């Protein structure tokens, strides 16, 4: 396809716009993955990635995209037939539960309305009934990428604790890691699943399992056949900065740069920057007169906003028109939200003018497609951004 | 300096945002400038660049930035002490006239108000008085980068013709080439000066002289000492695709890609895209309540807009604040316009969302700096862009 | 680590030296993996990769490194407890058999001497005894990367046919694909496993399963739990150029370029170029007076040569010295060959001067480390290369 | 032209193989050349380039290739009709003298045999006769790129001093800077001319004038018309890290990286590495039985070696065959040496295996073209390199 003038705005909720220094690092020549230069790199990224998960526990880096890390979390800790409690927060929670079923786990999916996050009370209630400890793991999504809802993981941890239930707690942070504050260790998560292509600002191709000591212990008795995903050989090789099989060398070169960039900015500043872009986006959406898919403001996602179009208007037609006119990619509605919802990604390597540029593309698309709306959404976003200098300054 | 989150908006009126395929071409390994691979490249760019000047006359490519091509135009065609008629359209016309003086030419600078272009009548009148043919060249700027005024070069040609004057016509198109329609041959220009870093979407480092047969003839009698800039050896070597001394090989690799990109889009579409960005920008400026430096709408530049701030407000403070807050670079006021005017570049590899992103950065900066203005400029730009679908479609 | 002067010579038997156009393609911005631009790319690489496996059967592209494709081949076609016949050609065959055991398969490993390839007769004899059809698959390595031995896969196919045995035939081509002639379809292979980082000249991070109709049928009854590796959802999504979960977008951008480069050169020319580099390398090795690990000239690998050092000399010390002195990475001996053997990779984006440069680095290292050898190996290689013009010309 | 397999060996005596980190820096987005980020860059490169010339005197950086810096040296210090004493060391000295004549200088060219460097005695003798001080400048080439002869500049300085002559001393270091030890200040040079595309490992497009206080004083009275090349405006703007007209921004980004790389290695190590590559090359050449163009071993160039072919053999045919067969570019014979001589560049980002790879390409080409020679040149080079460990180690 020919180059369209100007930069593409990749505002799906991931993969995100990869910064040029990261692309440059990925484009450096491949090095010998068994040599001393690689060893130094391996040690650096294996240590560095823990700081992003905010943990001192080990983090496994897979040369595979994020879905693989979902599978890894399950097959390293559980056995076929084990019961897993999951929560239907949206499309990705549903996909993960389907994977679990497909792998032969007994999945219990607490139903959800796709507009809210994990209800800790419901988890606690369900676990309270499980006197026999049949539930081996509770697996939830931190930031549900299909709905723009962020769940309170600390509250889920407390629910398990209050229920006095020994289940493992597994959390998918694929679309929150590096964008929304997350504490693998402080929040007592046993396996955190992450991916490279969102807040970490890399292309897809790496994924992660952060692992608690309890999860590690569980992995010794886990009955699933596994080899590629197996933690034990990974951890053994990682101890020296190496990997048991060929790693994705060039992606690791990029990962090193991405981690450095996040720390140069400061994780707190990174999170504040995402909060700011998210609130600006919501101001525009509300001004236009649309509903935000996430029903509870306390659960708004700082990584993406899912927008509900009025009945009778096709979100997919709108997205196609916006792509055609404005060289802007937006996320589609998934599952029951197909064609009803579009999603604006505001995560990764992103700043104010990309927020307003994105919103202007949406607003012009709305007009072009004849979707009734109140013009002025971009100005509403700008007013917020401008009135919010303290945050902006802190984020510098 | 550390990477700031998100993409820098380089909206000075050049250098412009270099497209990634051009940067990739420049970053290819340097090749032997006397070998067959280079020869093919040389032939391709020497032919291609003529299509951008819209001429079949030869175009010299210097491995030097644009100022050098100004000097080349003068020293190849004139002799020390020759009289040159120039027109004070703004800072760059003034700089060119200073260079001419410094080189020992007798410069006559028709005074201007820095808000309008070349008055063909005034040129005709002056030449009409020059019965003895003392004026050897008329040298004007097509698009005055300091003011955002585009002069009507065809009318200047007609002025010379009506005056029946034999002076050479020289035109600086550094900030218009590849952005604003320009016809070296059809308009009867003798030497057109161009540069790489604006509409051609390259970094600075190449510059051009398009040469009429009349200019070529004049060069045989021209009395300036010259070697690096000398046309004769260039043309001789260019005949085979080579250069008499080491060319800027990697820049030529980029030039090939840039020319292909312009033709892929279609020159007419490129010009229409610039017209559209310019009008959108002016709508915002007027909405804010500011004056456009260019006084005559027929002379509005499609490459940049110079904006006059109200008395008592510092344009430089505004620009610094916008750079700090929004990672957006704008052009400063030059000469008498220093601190009074700021300039928005809307040229090169640019599209709608970069227009609106840029304008939103300006509007937020105005608010932050307390410059009185009417909010809503971005929406005004969007209304125009949206109401202007036909042009947008044509530009696809 | 600081830049060492000059280019690193990455002459391990993969990952290989990635060509700059491939690196440039990988460094292009990530695109929306659900958009139309991606769809065109997906269709192109899914069709293109089949031409490299020389088949019209489907080829699955995993966003994971090669070891994953080993696992995928097994878990898609077999059930826990199934019997697999493997052949101990060297380290990688052994690793694959360990993986199979770890996954719960019953592995029968025909013993080997690590100096020769698969003996079709032995396979036929073993299958002839398997009247009950207990063996569900025969899994062999085409090019054993630890020893530099290439097995005759067509003969293995004939062995199965002669035995009239219904087992699936699985072949690992990770270090041969794109370097040594291979015919998935013509040779009747059921699952071919491949990777990106050798003959395909990409960094590690993609891997492949080429699948026969028989393998596809077997996958419907296969009892292993699987999801990430599952063929069915892949094939369904691939039908439209898409993937069921996030693919390694940027690697696919590189894959497209790499496939085009292989076809621009012509697969036959690519294979001839590898044969030529391999023979030149062997001439040097023999001249030095060393034994080649591969015992049978008919099984010499065109992708790498494993060299046996005389007793009492450490191959690892030699490699370390060569890396330090000459910025040249060589492969180490694996398993029982550790420190006894070093491996010279001569595959991927490679030509005569890289062969001689590599060999000179080895020869200088031998002298520096006091390993007794006959000097003149590089000249021996050059004599061969020079006397072999026809091949060189054909390969142009 | 399609990608040929493997890396091109660009072994002309410049442009040289650009290191990937330098190419990556050049491919970073262009920045505002009037903004604070540029100012920091400007200050850094303006300070850094002095360390390469080994001087605290100012160094002008032109956005133009090297030939421009020749012109700049002349027009800034001299007046039309001034007498310049030059020495015919080869093609580039001749070209520079032609340029001087073309510019209107009175050139006196001490004849040379194209096999030796500047004879300080001859210079002294000539200046001794110039009682009236008619000679305003002595201009010589440090490393004559056409012959591979390096002149002793300190001895030329002493010649001027002994003659008590006030002429300015100008030296071209285009093909020695950053490869061969050079001291602008200590050697009392008034104007040193340099370029980016050789030892500085950049593409062509930047050139330099290092300026003594005496040269600066002379520039105030110099009578040549000049503007682009004028030192005064450059120095004024440089004081703040800026440039009077648009600089070659992206090249400066690369220059910063290149200077850092040279200092990371250490200038003395860089020079020793070049000496080593040069001696290895000469060992091969002598072994083959060919004459080195440079007649006096004390004047051997460490940047390139010009090789004389036996009568009746075409150097150009040899080069063409080597390029076709081995993807290796060599330098051609220039002027009277055309087709008699070929030149091997061994400068810039270069190490042992590139030396031997290059020499092997030459040796195979000699055989292919039927040029009588004694095989074994590469081994001779290797013996030297291997016997020369101390230097190699020091160079690490």
Image (cartoon, coloured by chain):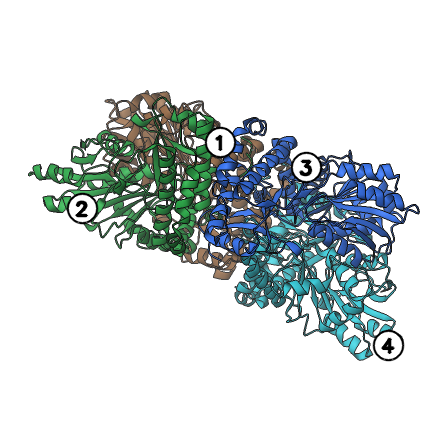
Chain colours: A blue, B green, C cyan, D brown
Cβ–Cβ under 8 Å for marks 3 and 1: no
The 10 Å Cα crowd at callout 4, few under 14, some 14 to 19, many 20 or more, is some
Of the pair D100 and D258, the residue shown nearer to us: D258
Q: CA distance from mark 2 to mark 3?
A: 68 Å
**Horizontally, is A382 left or right of C243 in the view?**
left
Is disc 1 in contact with disc 2, using a CB cutoff of under 8 Å? no
Residue B282, horizontal then vertical, whole percent: 35, 39
Q: Which residue is mark 1?
A: D181
Residue C128 tag number? 4
Task: Residue C47 in the image: state x and y as whole percent.
Answer: 60, 66
Q: Answer whether labels 2 and 4 touch (C-beta < 8 Å).
A: no
Disc 3 vs disc 1: which is toward the camera?
Answer: 3
Is residue D241 visible in the rendered image? The answer is no
Which label was assigned to residue A298?
3
Mark 4 lies on a secondary structure that is: helix
Residue pictured at 13% horizontal, 37% vertical: B135
Q: Pinpoint residue A324: horizontal percent, then vertical percent.
A: 48, 54
Which quadrant would residue C48 be assigned to in this image? Answer: bottom right
Q: Is residue D42 above or below residue A234?
A: above
Q: Secondary structure at mark 2?
A: helix
Chain letter of mark 1 equals D
Which mark is on residue D145? none
Disc 1, SS: loop
Q: Chain of mark 2?
A: B
Q: Are marks 2 and 3 in contact (CB under 8 Å)?
A: no
Residue C46, picture quadrant: bottom right
In the image, is residue C364 above or below residue B333? below
Which mark's residue is nearer the viewer, 4 or 3?
Answer: 3
Nearer to us: label 2 or label 3? 3
**Which residue bears the numbered disc 2?**
B157
Calculate the distance from the C-alpha at mark 3 to the C-alpha at mark 1. Answer: 67 Å
Q: Dot 2, crowdedness within 10 Å: few (<14), some or many (≥20)?
A: many
């Amino acid at each position: 396809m020919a180059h369209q003038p100007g930069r593409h705005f990749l505002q799906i909720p991931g993969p995100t716009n990869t910064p040029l220094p990261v692309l440059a690092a990925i484009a450096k020549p491949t090095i010998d993955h068994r040599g001393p230069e690689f060893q130094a790199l391996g040690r650096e990224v294996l240590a560095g990635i823990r700081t992003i998960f905010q943990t001192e526990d080990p983090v496994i880096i897979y040369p595979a995209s994020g879905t693989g890390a979902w599978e890894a979390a399950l097959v390293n800790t559980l056995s076929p037939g084990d019961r897993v409690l999951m929560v239907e927060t949206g499309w990705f929670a549903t996909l993960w539960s389907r994977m679990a079923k497909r792998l032969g786990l007994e999945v219990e999916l607490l139903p959800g309305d796709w507009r809210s996050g994990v209800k800790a009370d419901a988890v606690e209630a369900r676990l309270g009934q499980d006197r026999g400890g049949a539930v081996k793991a509770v697996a939830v999504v931190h930031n549900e990428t299909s709905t723009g809802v962020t769940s309170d993981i600390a509250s889920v941890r407390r629910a398990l604790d209050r229920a006095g239930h020994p289940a493992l707690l597994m959390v998918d942070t694929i679309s929150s890691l590096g964008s929304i504050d997350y504490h693998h260790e402080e929040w007592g998560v046993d396996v955190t699943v992450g991916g490279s292509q969102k807040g970490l600002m890399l292309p897809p191709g790496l994924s992660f399992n952060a692992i608690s000591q309890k999860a590690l212990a569980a992995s010794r008795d886990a009955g699933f056949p596994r080899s590629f995903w197996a933690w034990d050989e990974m951890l053994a090789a990682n101890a020296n900065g190496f990997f048991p099989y060929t790693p994705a060398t060039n992606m690791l070169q990029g990962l090193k740069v991405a981690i450095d960039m996040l720390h140069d900015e400061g994780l707190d500043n990174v999170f504040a920057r995402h909060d700011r872009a998210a609130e600006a986006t919501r101001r525009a959406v509300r001004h236009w007169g649309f509903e935000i898919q996430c029903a509870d403001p306390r659960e708004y996602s700082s990584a993406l906003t899912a927008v509900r179009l009025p009945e009778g208007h096709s979100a997919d037609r709108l997205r196609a028109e916006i792509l055609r006119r404005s060289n802007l990619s937006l996320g589609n509605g998934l599952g029951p939200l197909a064609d009803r919802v579009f999603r604006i990604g505001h995560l990764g390597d992103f700043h104010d003018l990309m927020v307003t540029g994105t919103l202007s593309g949406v607003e012009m698309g709305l007009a072009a497609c004849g979707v009734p709306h109140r013009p002025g959404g971009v100005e509403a976003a700008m007013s917020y951004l401008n009135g919010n200098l303290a945050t902006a300054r802190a984020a510098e």
